[in-house]
Amino acid sequence: MIAEGMVMLTHYVTRLTPGVLLFGLWFALTPRALPAMRILILLAAFVLMRDVMTPLHMWSLGSSAQIAFTDNAFVLAALGGLSVLLIMWLARLAPELWRLVRWFIGHPAIGLAIGLAVGCLMGVPLRVYQGIDVSEIHGYWVWLPGMVVLAFGGNALEEVLFRGFLQGYLEQQVTPMRAALISGVAFAACHSFLALSVTALGWPVLLFTLIEGLACAWVRMRYGVLPATLTHGTAILLIAVPLV
């Protein structure tokens, strides 16, 4: 598993590196006095990092609102861990953006409970619709720990970018509700390439990501980035299956 995973990760990094270097140069050349531009650069770089995984068969979107991730748990855990490291790196690289992140708003326990509940409200109906029976999925329980790391680690990075940086910045310019709406719509719009070009699944992907983005943006507005991360990660974890 580890040897195969290292090969897959090497292919991923090799394909990704030229684009990441250009985004990094663009980000470095952009003055800190232009936070909106720096946030957009980071969002575009994240979209590249996510969408490059598709042609490498690291994940796949199904027509029944099902997301299949590679059955290599080592790869999933490595990607989730890398996402957490990138979050820590961003804290040092862009402290002016990091100050925009509001981890909790109000009581943390209530926020986490709401985040979990909203994630279940999105994920459970889709899981029932898909008819997922884990007893029929070979290797599901071996795969699951790696998927947990990716679901919450990977989506923590996405939430820091969309709900921490973008929504936090927008709240300085417009009302919190409008900032949440923009954040949710931007989240769905950034899945357009995945829905319309990288894959051919089209509007169902955009509809789901719009609902998901608005839900996470609302949770962030009321309770903070960590509850929104719990919402996002829970929803993805509930609808994910191993890619076979």
Image (cartoon, grey):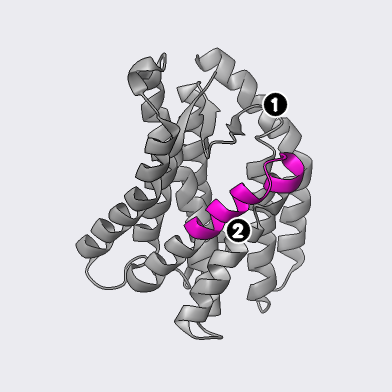
Give the residue pinned by disc 1: 11
Which region of the structure is painted magenta? Answer: 195-212
Instruction: Please rate how many residues cluster around mark 2, counting C-alpha atoms within 10 Å: few if below 14, some from 14 to 19, many from 20.
Output: many
Q: In this rendering, does residue 89 appear at all? A: no
Which of the two residues, 192 or 46, is positioned nearer the viewer here?
A: 192
Left or right of 66 on screen, residue 149: left
For the C terminus, give its image quadrant: top right
The x, y position of residue 137, in whole percent, is: 41, 18
Instruction: Say which amino acid is labelled 2.
Output: Ala
Instruction: Say which amino acid is labelled 1.
Output: His
Whole-Å distance between the Cαs marked 2 and 1?
Answer: 28 Å
Asked where in the image residue 57 lies, by quadrant, the reply is top right
Which of the two residues, 34 or 234, is positioned nearer the viewer here?
A: 234
Q: Is residue 131 above or below residue 94?
A: above
The verdict on residue 199 being magenta is yes
Q: Secondary structure at mark 2?
A: helix
Instruction: Please rate how many residues cluster around mark 1, counting C-alpha atoms within 10 Å: few if below 14, some from 14 to 19, many from 20.
Output: few
- Callout in the foreground (2, 1): 2
| Residue at horizontal 35 percent and vertical 22 percent from the top | 134
- The total of numbered circles placed on residues is 2
The verdict on residue 236 being magenta is no
* First along the sequence among labels 2 and 1: 1
Left or right of 152 on screen, residue 68: right
The x, y position of residue 37, in whole percent, is: 70, 71
Give the residue pinned by disc 2: 188
The x, y position of residue 116, in whole percent, is: 30, 52
Left or right of 168 on screen, residue 29: right
| Residue at horizontal 57 percent and vertical 72 percent from the top | 182
| Residue at horizontal 52 percent and vertical 84 percent from the top | 172
